[in-house]
Amino acid sequence: MIKRITVLLLVIILSSAMLAGCNTIRGVGKDVEKAGEVIQNSTK
């Protein structure tokens, strides 16, 4: 039970950090695009 609560809190904290990093939907799109570019470049 404690393990489940700990995992849930960790997910909430990480989600909050991600949302704080990109304040708008446009920011989310840019972050996703950048992540896609990194993945594409790593496969070359």
Image (spheres, rainbow, N blue to C red):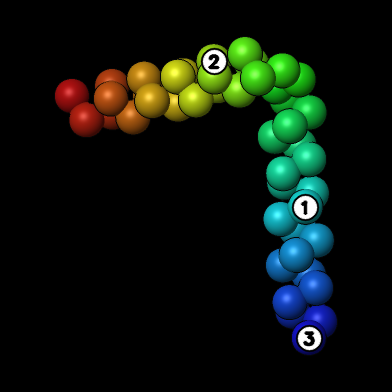
Q: Amino acid at mark 2?
A: Lys
Q: Considering only vertical position in the picture, is 34 above or below 8?
A: above
Q: Position of residue 34 (x, y in %)?
A: 46, 19
| Residue at position x 75%, y 65% in the image | 8
- In the image, which disc is placed on residue 30? 2
Residue 18 placement (x, y as % from top left):
70, 34
First in sequence, mark 3 or 2: give its number.
Answer: 3
- The residue lying toward the viewer, choosing from 15 and 25, is 25
The one nearer the camera, 26 or 39, is: 26
Mark 2, Cα crowd under 10 Å, few <14 / some 14-19 / many 20+, is: few
Q: Residue 12 got which mark? A: 1
Q: Is residue 25 above or below residue 2?
A: above
Q: Is residue 44 left or right of residue 35?
A: left
Q: Do the CB atoms of the residues marked 3 and 1 lie less than 8 Å apart?
A: no
Q: Residues within 10 Å of mark 1 (few under 14, many from 20)?
A: few
Q: Which mark is residue 29?
A: none
Kindly identify which numbered label has been placed on residue 1: 3
Q: Quadrant of residue 20?
A: top right
| Label located before the other in sequence (1 or 2) | 1
Q: CA distance from mark 1 to mark 2?
A: 22 Å
Q: Is residue 28 left or right of residue 3?
A: left
Q: Secondary structure at mark 2?
A: helix
Label 3 CA crowd tier, 10 Å (few <14, some 14–19, many 20+): few
State how far apart marks 3 and 2 are (Cα): 37 Å
How many numbered marks have been drawn onto this rendered protein structure? 3
Q: Quadrant of the C terminus?
A: top left
Q: Quadrant of residue 28?
A: top right
The image quadrant of residue 25 is: top right
Amino acid type at image mark 1: Ile
